[in-house]
Image (cartoon, rainbow, N blue to C red):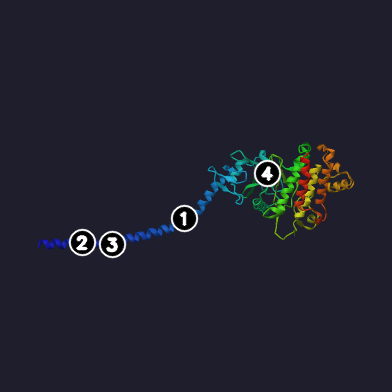
């Protein structure tokens, strides 16, 4: 009977093992279900709450290091590996910390000037390149609307006679725009500062007039957006190292649709002395408003005098003074005396004055188009350069 007993024990043990294995499999299935469910829940929580914070932190670190990148000649950014990270159509966001560091904490020694928008500072990148940092003043008349208008508008414009923008900052109530640095400041400094009037000779003045006309023509006719600047003046023309003019400050600029020729506004903004009559009195502005301002600017470049000055007892502005000299055939008296313009070029100077006076006609219909301005300036410039 020994053998059956062993057999019985073996069978019983075999049954016991099967029951144990079945139980373990059930536990394993339960554990797997719980583990997968926990993993899914954890993944959802991570994606929903944690990932955005990590992304923000990472973005902040990238912004903090933007000033460590190299700026290409076309305004794009290149990292150390040479990979292009930020193109013009994607305006880079600078961190406040990096801008503060580049301007030495907005030091007074780095201040370049003060405009209607606010103070402008000189900043230096880690690679030694300089930038201009335009900081919105808390007391500025131009507020958030103008800041955003300039930020989005100028980022879409690319022309050698328009100032380039490298990035912006909107952090901790600070609103800042970062531009290319113009070492020769603005045109008004050379036109109206007594010690600087002799720096730009006749040839340079022709070059500056032609450059402004080209930039204006681009805004009015050839850019992807038809734009009226509305604040064209000497202080908004910046000069690079080669004295090439660049139109700046697009905070007041407006975009025109394809079929629009003029617009009306109840808010008159800009600078008196450069405003066209229809805009100053009725709020009507168009590309012809910019043409009027260009005419005033052109007269200022030729004469070295401000439009808002007093000339004699009967002239309260440069325009009336220039009109009177034109009618009397004494245009040569309008030219900056220190330019020492040869007598053979008096006719050329007269043509410049004629174009400028056409631009400031009271009726907008009588003013030329910007394309005509460019053609005229080139026609005048060519014979002079061939002498």
Label number found at residue 23: 3
What is the x, y in percent for residue 58?
52, 49
Q: Along the horizontal axis of the image, is 227 left or right of 336? A: left
Kindly report the distance in space between the C-alpha atoms of the residues bearing marks 4 and 1. 43 Å
The residue pinned by badge 1 equals 46
What residue is shown with label 4? 120
10 Å crowding of disc 3: few (<14), some (14-19), many (20+): few
Residue 141 in view here: no
The Cα–Cα distance between marks 2 and 3, rounded to whole angstroms, is 15 Å
- Quarter the N terminus occupies: bottom left
- Residue at (86, 42) in percent of width and height: 332
Q: Mark 2 vs mark 3: which is more N-terminal?
A: 2
Residue lying at the far left in this picture: please name it. 1
Q: Kindly check if marks 4 and 3 are in contact, taking CB atoms under 8 A apart as contact.
A: no
Q: Which residue is mark 2?
A: 14
**Which is nearer the N-term, disc 4 or disc 1?**
1
Pinpoint residue 245: horizontal percent, then vertical percent: 72, 44
Is residue 56 left or right of 32 when viewed as pictured? right
First-in-chain label (2 vs 4):
2
């Amino acid at each position: 009977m020994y053998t059956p007993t062993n057999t019985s024990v073996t069978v019983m043990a075999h049954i016991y093992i099967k029951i144990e294995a079945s139980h373990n499999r059930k536990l394993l299935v339960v554990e797997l279900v719980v583990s997968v469910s926990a993993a899914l829940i954890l993944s959802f929580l991570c994606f929903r709450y944690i990932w955005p914070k990590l992304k923000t932190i990472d973005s902040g670190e990238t912004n903090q290091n933007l000033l460590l990148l190299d700026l290409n000649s076309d305004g794009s950014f290149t990292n150390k590996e040479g990979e292009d990270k930020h193109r013009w159509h994607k305006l880079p966001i600078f961190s406040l910390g990096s801008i503060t560091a580049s301007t030495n904490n907005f030091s007074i020694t780095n201040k370049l000037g003060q405009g209607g928008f606010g103070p402008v500072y000189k900043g230096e990148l880690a690679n030694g390149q300089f930038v201009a940092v335009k900081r919105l003043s808390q007391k500025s008349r131009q507020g958030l609307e103008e800041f955003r208008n300039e930020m989005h508008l100028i980022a879409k414009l690319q022309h050698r006679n328009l100032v380039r923008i490298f990035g912006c900052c909107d952090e901790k109530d600070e609103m800042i725009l970062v531009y290319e640095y113009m070492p020769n400041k603005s045109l008004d400094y050379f036109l109206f500062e007594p010690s600087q009037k002799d720096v730009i000779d006749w040839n340079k003045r022709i070059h500056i007039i032609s450059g402004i006309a080209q930039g204006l023509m681009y805004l009015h006719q050839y850019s992807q957006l038809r734009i009226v600047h509305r604040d064209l003046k000497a202080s908004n023309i910046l000069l690079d190292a080669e004295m090439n003019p660049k139109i700046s400050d697009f905070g007041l600029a407006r975009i025109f649709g394809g079929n629009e020729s003029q617009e009306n506004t109840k808010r008159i903004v800009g600078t008196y002395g450069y405003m066209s009559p229809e805009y100053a009195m009725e709020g009507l502005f168009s590309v012809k408003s910019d043409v009027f301002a260009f005419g005033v600017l052109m007269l200022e470049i030729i004469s070295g005098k401000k439009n808002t000055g007093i000339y004699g007892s009967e002239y309260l502005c440069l325009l009336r003074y220039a009109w009177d000299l034109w009618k009397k055939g004494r245009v040569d008296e309008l030219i900056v005396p220190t330019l020492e313009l040869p007598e053979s070029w008096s006719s050329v100077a007269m043509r410049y004055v004629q174009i400028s006076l056409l631009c400031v006609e009271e009726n907008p219909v009588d003013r030329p188009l910007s394309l005509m301005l460019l053609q005229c300036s080139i026609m005048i410039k060519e014979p002079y350069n061939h002498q």
